Image: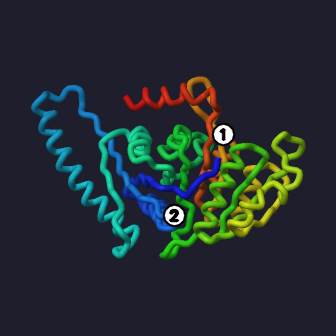
Amino acid sequence: MQLEHPKHILAPVDFSELSALALQYADALGRCSGARLTVLHASSFEAPPYFTQGQLDELRARLRAAQRQAERDLRDFVRKALGPDAPMPAVRVVEGRPVETILRAAQETGSDLIVMGTHGRSGWNRWMLGSVTERVLRETSIPVLTVRGNVRPPERPLTIRNILCPVNNTTVARRALQQAVEMAHCLDATLTLLHVDEGPSPDRIADLCAWAPEQQRRRCRIREIVRRGEASREIIAQAAEEGCDLLVIGAQHRTFFDSTVIGSTTVRVVRHAPCPVLTVVEREPEAAAPIEANVRQEQN
């Protein structure tokens, strides 16, 4: 499958500095690719069950007024994040639970890339998928660019010059490579292919230089690096040593009982990489129908 530049980017924000930073990345990719950009703010409120009908009517009126103010605040937020001279993207303020609202908005707008910030956690929860961003990452089939709070705020205009793409001998890694090539070509960035040799494995690549097709090499500057060790540790170390601006990784969605999980390598890279991470996801064919049904059930 030949991936193209994104045509519509969805950028959910929560008015935090981190989401402002993520919005700058969304804007940079949108300007490069010519994609439309929609900025979304989702807020959830449920009235107490003991409210009378009169109280509910008054509350709805107040919520409508608050939403109009939130739309004005959102435009001010976007203008401050992107600068006064940047074109104003489409903005949407939607009442609803954030994860379900983001997934629904991505479908309604035909978005083919989601860009959002992810707040780090401490302790055991750093290895769990529980935040809004990571639930979106787990439940969508759209590529998701995650920006963590450890990323140093870039100078304007934001530039992406060094892209790292870890690969192994899998279909989803080739899809991630295609996406990385398209972005490197669009951004005039150097693309580094990294293969981590973890020993005897069906995903091992014997000759990395022969793995990337020639037509992809002609589209951008490609370097090849092989490291040995545990995959997530070596990927994160390479990203830090290279000073990467963006990391592109493939992830396989797998069904675990009645939910969806992604591999531990991707989880650790998303949580600990020193740069934003674009995750290109691929679902197991037999898991697609139950997963979609599960998302629809959560939306109701």
Left or right placement of residue 109 versus residue 120 in this view: left
Left or right placement of residue 40 versus residue 32 in this view: left
Numbered mark located on residue 139 in the image: none
Left or right placement of residue 135 versus residue 51 in this view: right
- Would you place residue 287 above or below residue 23 in this image? above
Q: Which is nearer the eye, 101 or 177?
A: 177
Outermost residue on the front side: it is 215
Q: Would you identify the image quadrant in which residue 91 lies?
A: bottom left
**Spot occupied by residue 47 in the image (x, y as percentages of width and height):** 24, 33
Can residue 79 be seen here? The reply is yes
Outermost residue on the left side: it is 54
**Spot occupied by residue 205 in the image (x, y as percentages of width and height):** 84, 49
**Spot occupied by residue 248 in the image (x, y as percentages of width and height):** 64, 55
Quadrant of the drawing holding the C terminus: top left
Q: For mark 1, what is the residue?
A: 252
The residue at 35%/51% (across/down) is 41
Q: For mark 2, what is the residue?
A: 33
The residue at 42%/59% (across/down) is 36
